[in-house]
Image (cartoon, rainbow, N blue to C red):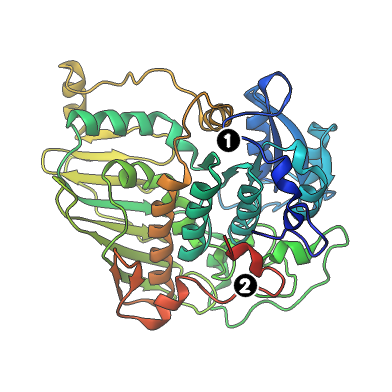
Amino acid sequence: MIGLTRRKSLLATGAAASWAMIPGKALGANGKVNLACIGIGNQGAGVAGAMATTGLANIVALCDVDIDSTGPIGKGDNEYGWNKEGVAPADTVAKFPNARKFRDFRAMFDQMGNEIDAVVVAVPDHSHFPISMAAMALGKHVYVEKPMARTFKEIELMMAAASKYKVVTQMGNQGHSGTNYFQFKAWTESGVIKDVAHVDAYMNSPRRWHKWGNVKAFPAGEAVPPAMDWEVWQGTAQPHDFSEKLHYGNWRGWYDFGTGCFGDWGAHILDTIHQFLDLGLPEKVSAKKLDGPNPFIYPLATTINFQFPSRGAMPAMDIDWYDGVKNKPPVPEGYTGDGAKKPGKFIYSKEHVFQGGSHSDPLYIVPLEKHKALLMDGTITKDFGKNSNHYENFLRACRGDEQSRSPFSVAGPLCQMLSLGCLAQRLGGALEFDRKTKRITNNKQADELLAGPPPRKGWEQYYRL
């Protein structure tokens, strides 16, 4: 089992077995879930607040390598265009004054393991894996931001751990509990969505690394901020000196730490397509366009094609992914909107063409007049009932009241598809993938990168179930 720290850990001594929770049962007062939030700046701050707002969680611990940082975080350099001042970890601490504070998740588990039911993991992509694996081995339910992990192998291990330890899991693709989820489910079950042959998906906003141009090396080292634990931030990744070009937020564009635009947004745009069209893993991934390929960071623009075989009664189909400011997909006949203004997709089936956005955005049939006519005659509906949101769904699943909608068993294959796309963005060419053996058969380097380089010394234990 996983040893949590360099110190003598509860788990290593076997003491964890005496307090490991029973899945589906909460230890907190009044049936609330005792929740630890790991990564509490920016997105992590929002998730912590959303969990608390449900009224189903007690925030008992807060953990961040910058726990006392007052920010501003990412000021003036936020690729999403919202909250440009950022939310500092100290802002989140102020909202939950009764929660205990930690910089190191391993110390938190050592000291508070028997007081925690579940964890939120909202740290950079490369650290999702060790924290989630440690939590699951201790019987803790896990809500982890998307994508689940950085490499194909890490995702495989996380799925296996969730099954072994029988914990509730949820990936933070929040739209998986929104209108698009219930609409896509209902329309596939009723046959409105069927015989899909092709999908164009896109995200054309500028990204942080676009302004860097042709990067020829990792950034020069800078002084580590005095309040920061850089050792813990690096996690399982290969060692690098601290730089503001890695943290905050800038980590996403580096192969060693992030999953680029596709790993970030593909989980929100392709999630329902992947689940309800039963895509699984592709049999071929091809780089159709790479603008500014680079050995360190993701390209400025990419078009990646994924080919899927027939699945039962569903025909073979493919997906083209477009990112980059000027790299936009063709639009279907009859479409009058501006698909470039926000991320989205066009879905081409035998009978209909659908347009949708990201997250919870609903689908519309193209042209819109056809959509309205089908709505009027009752062929389609816009009423999908009242359902729990993504955070409430996770907490209710922890209590045994519901099933989580984006568990690792569902989110894992989606994220593995994303990881294969990231390899095509990095290496170019066409990758032949064996869906049974889960190996890349025509490119040795790509096959080795399914696992990536060995973890940094001292972090190997997280790779052992």
- Report the side of 369 relative to 385 (left or right): left
Residue depicted at 53% across the width and 72% down the height? 297
From this view, report whether residue 247 is shown above or below residue 54: below
In the rendered structure, the answer to whether residue 415 lies left or right of residue 296 reads left
Between 414 and 240, the one nearer to me in the picture = 414
Residue type, mark 1 in image: Pro
Residue 115 screen position, x and y as percent: 76, 36
The residue singled out by tag 1 in the image is: 23
Q: Which residue is mark 2?
A: 455
Quadrant of the rendering where the N terminus is positioned? bottom right
Give the percent coordinates (x, y) of residue 76: 67, 52
Dividing the picture into quadrants, the one containing residue 114 is top right
Q: Is residue 203 visible?
A: no
On-image quarter of the C terminus:
bottom right
Residue drawn at (53%, 59%) of the image? 207
Is disc 2 placed on a helix, strand or loop? Answer: loop
* 182 relative to 273, above or below: above
Other-residue count near label 1 (Cα within 10 Å), few / some / many at <14 / 14–19 / ≥20? some
Dot placed on the residue nearer the N-terminal end, 2 or 1: 1
Residue lying at 43% horizontally and 30% vertically, measured from the top left: 178
Say whether residue 91 is visible.
Answer: yes
Residue type, mark 2 in image: Pro
